[in-house]
Image (cartoon, rainbow, N blue to C red):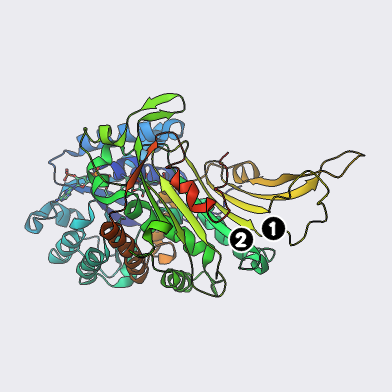
Amino acid sequence: MMAKLVPVDEFDLIIFGGTGDLAMRKLLPALFHREGDGQITGDSRIIAASRGEVSRDDYLARVETALRENLADTFNEQQWQTFRNRIHYVQADAGAHDQWGELVAILAGHDHRTRVAYLATAPGLFGAFANGLRHNGLITGDSRIVLEKPVGHDSASADAINNAVGECFAENQIFRIDHYLGKETVQNLLALRFGNSLFEPLWRRGTIDHVQITVAEDLGVGGRGEYYDRIGALRDMVQNHLLQLVCLVAMEPPSSLDHDAVRDEKIKVLRALRLISADNVKTNTVRGQYAAGAIKGQPVESYQDEMGGVASSCETFVALKLEIDNWRWSNVPFYIRTGKRLKAKHSEIVLQFQDVPHSIFSEQSYDISPNQLMIRLQPDEGVKLSVMAKEPGPGGFDLRPVSLDLSFEETFGVRYPDAYERLLMEVLRGNPALFMRRDEVSAAWNWIDAIIAGWEETHQKVESYVAGSWGPTSSSFLLDRDGRAWHPES
Ligand SMILES: NC(=O)C1=CN([C@@H]2O[C@H](COP(=O)(O)OP(=O)(O)OC[C@H]3O[C@@H](n4cnc5c(N)ncnc54)[C@H](OP(=O)(O)O)[C@@H]3O)[C@@H](O)[C@H]2O)C=CC1
Ligand SMILES: O=C1O[C@H](COP(=O)(O)O)[C@@H](O)[C@H](O)[C@H]1O
């Protein structure tokens, strides 16, 4: 059964960067699915923009190819005929506001409908696009602007972007995307925590020993090497996606699902993160870069070879031990890791409970494993709780861990929508709950900046790991020295 789908009001969605990878691989396929479910109404339009001179027919041909490639069996010929009529292409260079005539003309007379400008381009252009919209009188009362991540590459650049966009748009018109917040399983974390009374009394120090968050990818940097090499895993993934996951696990219950109620709780977590800087960076962080190896039986080249043989100190893997300085999480470490070219695409959150205080089974040969609550984000989204059970049999009393395992796909029997499908609908509805507020972005950057400064000051090494492994061996030591281990991936 699928949740009720509410259509959105007629809109004009301008995608700056409309010829780029994100637009072709994620945004247009997401909109195509929403078309299929009848959420896009009336004469709503998708207006792609970029610098190139491209005819509408050529652009439509590119979109069709991309949709066929990315949607595979969910591509539908009849639906394409309706969808293609919504799509337009205009030429608009971020640096040449006076030449946005095509965009001005196509929007003329449509000021009454929802207008969204989606900036699917490098963040350095965000201010220029916002200015271009203002300069050409294209910001209506019901206009919104969407900023793709990353918003900047450090706290200062994020502030500069936020200031520039903030001069043209009010904060409630600015939607900063973190697509992890649109993932069904990430939202399920809220359902699990606050839709059940079972977990809340246990969700704290005294019961939970530690928390682990893993976001592992088997892909390398692919065609995004130029961007990635300047950014690295800490900025690309931890500053946004992983810290958002930390917030959702660690935050206090918000009073409602109201956007500011949730974001007010998340910001408290970000502000309570203990600083990692030059003094403690070596003991709390591990950086890695993949060497050649094999994934699913296929050889893969090293990061350096992927980058054309040029040596680089960019980290493609990072693991951190972080502490949250508040009552709930005092002395409960969060271990987080993310990397490219790891053994499999596998993302999960594991809450490990404390050992039983005293074992009445001490005569038996089996150890009692601590309970674990595992929230699988992807693939095979679901929740698993491991508990100890007695092995059946008339003799002895042997214990073994067994799982209460819930697979969302099996339970609900529906296709899991891509995060962008939900997020685009939320922007069009004007609901900012699943987007990052300016203070969140800023607090996250402040914490990340200190780690990067610490790495630079201590010249922290980027350790090599074999592609197809789970990262550098020292990422295991990060837990090993605390008497813990990463949850074995399935
Ligand atoms: N690709 C992905 O999976 C993800 C991307 N992102 C973020 O989304 C943003 C876009 O990424 P991606 O699509 O991969 O990048 P691409 O390089 O594939 O696309 C960039 C787009 O911007 C346009 N562009 C570049 N310069 C200008 C300019 N001066 N004026 C107008 N348009 C311009 C390009 O078209 P043209 O050159 O013709 O002008 C192109 O359409 C980045 O910030 C990225 O970090 C975030 C998450 C995932
Ligand atoms: O934002 C990003 O996310 C992707 C991973 O997203 P997922 O939904 O496939 O888990 C990552 O590959 C990319 O480097 C990063 O910019």
Asked whether mark 2 and ligand 2 are closer than 8 Å, the reply comes as no
Identify the mark at residue 135; answer none if there is no mark: none
Identify the element where label 1 is drawn: loop
* Amino acid, disc 1: Asp
**Quadrant in the picture for the C terminus:** top right
Locate residue 258 relative to residue 210 in the image: left or right.
Answer: left
Task: Mark 1: give few (<14), some (14-19) or many (20+) Cα within 10 Å.
Answer: some
Task: Mark 2: give few (<14), some (14-19) or many (20+) Cα within 10 Å.
Answer: many
* Amino acid, disc 2: Asp
Q: Answer with the quarter of the image where residue 310 lies.
A: top left
Q: Position of residue 252 (x, y in %)?
A: 54, 71
Q: CA distance from mark 1 to mark 2?
A: 8 Å
Name the residue carrying label 2. Answer: 209
Locate residue 98 relative to residue 469 in the image: left or right.
Answer: left
Identify which residue is drawn at 30% across, 49% down. 232
Is 77 in front, or is 277? Answer: 277
